[in-house]
Amino acid sequence: MMVVNDRLLEDKMTEIEQARAWSPRVISKFETLIRSGDDQALYRVNPLAFARDRAIAEPESIDLFLHAARCGLFDMSWDVLCPQSGMVLDSFGALRTLQTHYVCGLCDVSGDTNLDDFIEVSFSVSPHLRRLPFHEPQTLSVEDFHWKLRFGNDGRLPGQDVRFLDVLRGFVRGMTFLPPGTTTTLRADLDPGSLSGVNVQTQAAFAVPISGDPVLAPTLLKINYDGRRFLPALPAVPPGPVVIEVANTGPGRGALLLINWPPELVALTTKPTLDFDPYVSGGALLARQTFRRLFRSERVDEKEGLGIRQITFLFTDLKGSTAMYERLGDLNAYALVREHFALLNAAVHQHSGAVVKTIGDAVMAVFSRPSDAISAALSIFEEIDRFNGDNVRPGIVLKMGAHCGPSIAVTLNDNLDYFGQTVNIAARVQSLAEAGQVCISEALYSAPGVSDLLAGRSVVAFDAPLRGVEGDATVYRIMRG
C-alpha cells in the first residue's frame, strides 16, 4: 500500500511551484509520479528519462528534481557505475564524500572514473514523504536485493539492443544471503568456463576455473567468507553437479551471486563497456547554474579534486571598462556592469551552463556540452545588441573566447571552481578576440554540433601561440552578424 505524507507533499510542492515558472502540467506530472509511481519508479530516478517519458524539456526536468532535493522531497545521490556491468558500486549522498575509484568484483575490474563518465546523479523519494522497501535493504528479498537495488536496468551490450542483465541472468547459478555464523549450501550444474561469486554490496569476490572431464557425482566446494574475502578450498572444479558450502565467519550478513561464465567471456582480456541511456553525470550537474545556486554547501576537496574528461569554458570580457568608469563615474558604471552580469547569467543559464565566477568585469562560465557554449555566446551577442538598443547610455561591448577539454573540479574560497590547462587556454583564446567577437579553439570548433551552429556565419581561422601548446595553434574568430 502506497502511503504518502500529504501535508509534507502539499507544503513542499507549493515551495517548488513558487521557486520559478514551470511549463504547463510539469508540476502535476511530478506529483503523479510521487503518488502513483511504483516503488522502482521512485528509486534512483533519472531526470532525463522522466523528461523523455513525459515530453518535458531535459533542463526543466533536471531543475525540477534539484528543487525537489533541496526542499527534502527527494534525496540526491552520486552513484558510481561499473562500465562493464552497470552495477551501482557505491552511492554517495554528498559531493564532498564522493570517491571516484571503483572496484567491481563481478567483472574483476578496478579503476578511476571521471565526473562526466560513469558517475550518475539520481534521485530517490525521501522516506519522510513515501517509504520504499529500498530504504530498508535488509528487508528486501534476495532477488530484489540484487536485481533492483544494486543494478541499473538500461546497460546494453555495445551496439546492440540487448540488456546486459538479461545476458547475466542466463549465467547465474544461484544467489543467497549469508547469515553470520552459519553455513549456507547451494547446488548447481556447471558448464566449462569459470565459476565466480561476488558480494554485490562489498565487491568481495572469488573465481575458480571449471575445467577437466565432466563428472556425474557432485563436487563439494567449501568456501570461507570472513566478511572481507571469499576463500575457496579448491583451485578448480570439473564440469557437472556441484555442492557449494559457504561458511560466513564474519560479523555481519553477506550475500553471494554465483555465476558460471562461459569460456568465450573468460577468454576476453578486455571486457566491453556497455551502452547506457543518457543520464545526468556528475560533471554535467556541476555545470548547471541551478545546482550551484541551490547546493552551495556541496564541496570538492581542494587537495584531491575531481577529474572531468570533457568540459567547455567560456570567458567574457567587457571592453573599455576603465574608460567607461572614467566617463560615467563609479556608481553609474558599476550599475551598468551589474546589468551586464545579469544578462550574462540569464543567457548562460538558458543554455544549460553556469557562471563559475566573475573576475573584475570578466566572467568565467562552464558548459558540459560544447554546443551549449557556442549557443550561449551567440545568444549573448543578440542580448547585448537588444540591451544597447533599449538604453540611452553608452553601449557595452564584449569580447569572448572558449575552449574545451579535461579539467579538475575543486572547491576554493567556498566556490566550486575549475583548474588545469584547459582553463588557461580558454582564457588565452579569449584574449585574442577583438571587440564584438568570440574566438574558439580548434578542439571546440571540431566538437559535435558546433559547426552546424556556425553555418552561414563569418568564421576566420588564424594561427596564434597558446601557452602550454607547442607551436602555434589554430584559432577561429567568429564575427557578429
Image: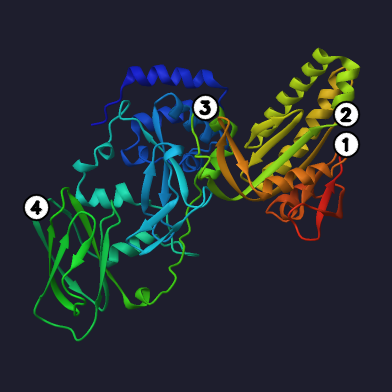
Asked if marks 3 and 4 touch (Cβ < 8 Å), the reply is no
Report helix, strand or loop for mark 4: loop
Asked if marks 3 and 1 touch (Cβ < 8 Å), the reply is no
Look at 72% across and 50% down and name the residue there: 450
- Tell us which disc is closer to us: 4 or 1: 4
| Residue 206, image x, y percentages | 26, 66
The residue to which callout 1 is attached is 435
Q: Taking 172 as reference, is 343 left or right?
A: right
- Spatial CA distance of label 2 from label 4 is 76 Å
Asked if marks 4 and 1 touch (Cβ < 8 Å), the reply is no
Please, what is the three-letter code of the amino acid marked with disc 4? Gly
Among the two numbered marks 3 and 4 on one chain, the one whose residue lies closer to the N terminus: 4
The residue to which callout 3 is attached is 294
The residue to which callout 2 is attached is 320
Look at 49% across and 33% down and name the residue there: 298
Please, what is the three-letter code of the amino acid marked with disc 1? Ala
Please, what is the three-letter code of the amino acid marked with disc 3? Leu
- Tell us which disc is closer to us: 2 or 3: 2
Q: Residues within 10 Å of mark 3 (few under 14, many from 20)?
A: some
Report helix, strand or loop for mark 2: loop
- Spatial CA distance of label 3 from label 4 is 47 Å
